[in-house]
Image: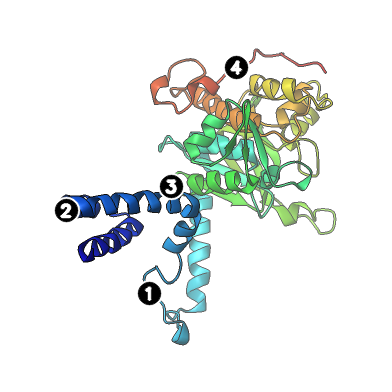
Amino acid sequence: MAVAAASVAGLQVAAKAGLSSSLHENKSSLSSSSSAAISGVRLSLSSVFAKKSKSFALAAVSPSASASSPYDFNDFKFEPIKESTVSREMTRRYMTDMITYADTDVVIVGAGSAGLSCAYELSKNPDIRVAIVEQSVSPGGGAWLGGQLFSAMIVRKPAHIFLDELGVEYDEQDTYVVIKHAALFTSTVMSKLLARPNVKLFNAVAAEDLIVKGGRVGGVVTNWALVSLNHDTQSCMDPNVMEAKVVVSSCGHDGPFGATGVKRLKSIGMVDNLPGMKALDMNSAEDAIVRLTREVVPGMIVTGMEVAEVEGAPRMGPTFGAMMVSGQKAAHLALKALGLPNAIDGTADRSSLAAPELLLASAEDGDTVTA
């Protein structure tokens, strides 16, 4: 009995630590009577683990189970630094980025769900430099929340394939999935995207205008967003410029900074009509937004809800799958415009694409959707 008791105690320790190899060694060295006792304990422990898995998971990361802190909180000191060093580091790096991206491959205007998805897809090619211009201090657009300031994000299938690629967890339903908080998607795609060396986000920067030469969009006119908002209160504050081979406009639907790309195209006569988005119809809206994502004028691709503004498509409301897939499609349209392999004209190796079935053929020029 002493042997059996000792074996049981050893098994409990091994089971909690997840040491399956130790279990195997202990079991093989025991007598038949001890093995029977151990089997009973194993079944008992399995039942307990099934009911208490969350408790064990929490215990595994609790302070008592973790390694000692690398800090001495009772006498904590930072390494010394000169204030001028902080200023120089920020200024030098930002100015280097401005020089680097003054003439770049792709400029994406608007860092909402479509713009971020587009930038993520483009950034997979390390030879393409991608600049993202976002007027807000906090990129993400409306993708930090679901509808009506609720938390959950609804994504209709098959756009969940993009979430699988990103590693975003969700609650799966028959025809859609639910991310418990929209910020989980936005923060995940942003963290993966901005870690790549060929991408620079210029937030708190507004695209005030377009560069147009010979009937082709060739870049954007930029300024600090706070300056753009105060042109009427100050004397002349001239902008800066950012040339690009391709401009992707993902400025969202009409609003303070919404649909600014297509609005400017209309005001300078590069598009004849700007019907604005029609009333909500989720089922037709999401398909239309992806289908009509296209190069609306030479050098400028429109993606996301801005597509509805220029094409007269219905609004989609609080579902986000079309934003993701429209952004992916815009990225491949940009690759096509750059003369690089892409999934639009079939020149890319589709086996290398994470979700080739999501990418629809480009809409013909002049296609519109009626409400």
Q: Earlier in the sequence, mark 2 or mark 1?
A: 2
> Which residue matches tag 1?
68
Q: What is the CA distance from the residue labelled 1 to the residue labelled 3?
A: 34 Å
Q: Where is residue 132 in the image (x, y as percent from the top left)?
A: 58, 43
**Amino acid at dot 1:** Ser
Q: Is residue 349 above or below residue 167?
A: above
Q: What is the CA distance from the residue labelled 2 to the residue labelled 1?
A: 40 Å
Q: Is residue 106 at least partly visible in the picture?
A: no
> Which residue matches tag 2?
31
> Which residue matches tag 4?
362
Residue at the location (67% across, 47% down)?
A: 144
Q: Nearer the viewer, mark 2 or mark 3?
A: 2
Q: Position of residue 168 (x, y in %)?
A: 53, 42
Task: Assign the N terminus to one quadrant of the image.
Answer: bottom left
Q: In this view, does 92 lie above or below 47?
A: below
Q: Which of marks 4 and 2 is nearer the N terminus?
A: 2
Which quarter of the figure has residue 175? top right
**Amino acid at dot 3:** Pro
Task: Assign the C terminus to one quadrant of the image.
Answer: top right
Query: Dot 4: what SS?
Result: loop
